[in-house]
Amino acid sequence: MEKSMSLGERIKYYRKKLGLSQDVLSVKSGISSPSISDYENNKAIPRRQTLEKLAQALNVDIEEFSEEKEPQQELSKEYPGLKNYFDMYSERFIHMSVLGKVHAGNPNEIPEDLIIGGVDLPLSIARGADYVLKVSGMSMKEEGIDENDIVLIRLQKYAENGQVCIARIGGEKYVIKRFRQKDGRTWLESANSIYEPITDNFEVIGIITGLVKKFI
């Protein structure tokens, strides 16, 4: 297999290597045939959980869907915090889906099926995350989470006391806050005194597993 293959080409390569049709791979992986077709044709970017299902169905290591890359100048320029990884390590990378922007401030809508792009990250950073979001707003600035930073998200419906999480407000809007719990009460807390805590009508949908800074 050529190292220059795209992610979609790699999925197709391993599928054909096993002599599987897209329909058979759909049954083995639990992923719809149209989605597999979109992934193979690079029309959509699978989340990490989806890649794990594909890797298991195709009997390959998940790292086969990442790439060895040269230092990535554009990403290093936009996110200087990654430069050390590109310069110091010959590390494998994985393409993470960017699903939109999440407010560190007032809640906003994030269409769950909307992928607006992607970013290549070292596995040491991306491991354990399902997708990434860009931050909009400054309500978490005292935690060092600023406008246009990238946050890595692991999907889960709970958070431990003090964890930074993604929460859904009123069933349709999303926000990034710190989860707090005490004396039987739960609330969402900003890291900026101008924002009031959110005390009801919210549900945790994921936690922050990593942060990539944007300095300029």
Image (cartoon, grey):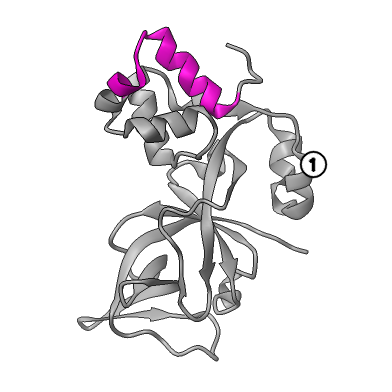
**Figure quadrant of the C terminus:** bottom right
Q: Taken as a whole, is the magenta stretch helix, strand or loop?
A: helix
The image position of residue 78, as x and y in percent, is 75, 54
Region rendered in magenta: 6-25
Residue 41 seen in render = yes
Residue 65, position as x, y percentages in the image: 51, 27
User: Which residue shows up at 52% across the image and 27% down it?
Assistant: 8
Is residue 17 a member of the stretch shown in magenta? yes
Q: Amino acid at mark 1?
A: Gln
Residue 61 coordinates in the image, percent (x, y): 43, 22
* Residue for badge 1: 73
Question: In the rendered picture of this protein, how many numbered marks are placed on residues?
Answer: 1
Q: Is residue 211 above or below residue 103?
A: above
In depth, the one of 183 and 147 nearer the eye is 147
| 32 falls in the magenta region | no
Depth check: 15 or 183 in front?
15
User: Which sits in the foreground, 171 or 200?
Assistant: 171
**Above or below 180: residue 58:** above
Looking at the figure, which quarter contains the N terminus?
Answer: top right
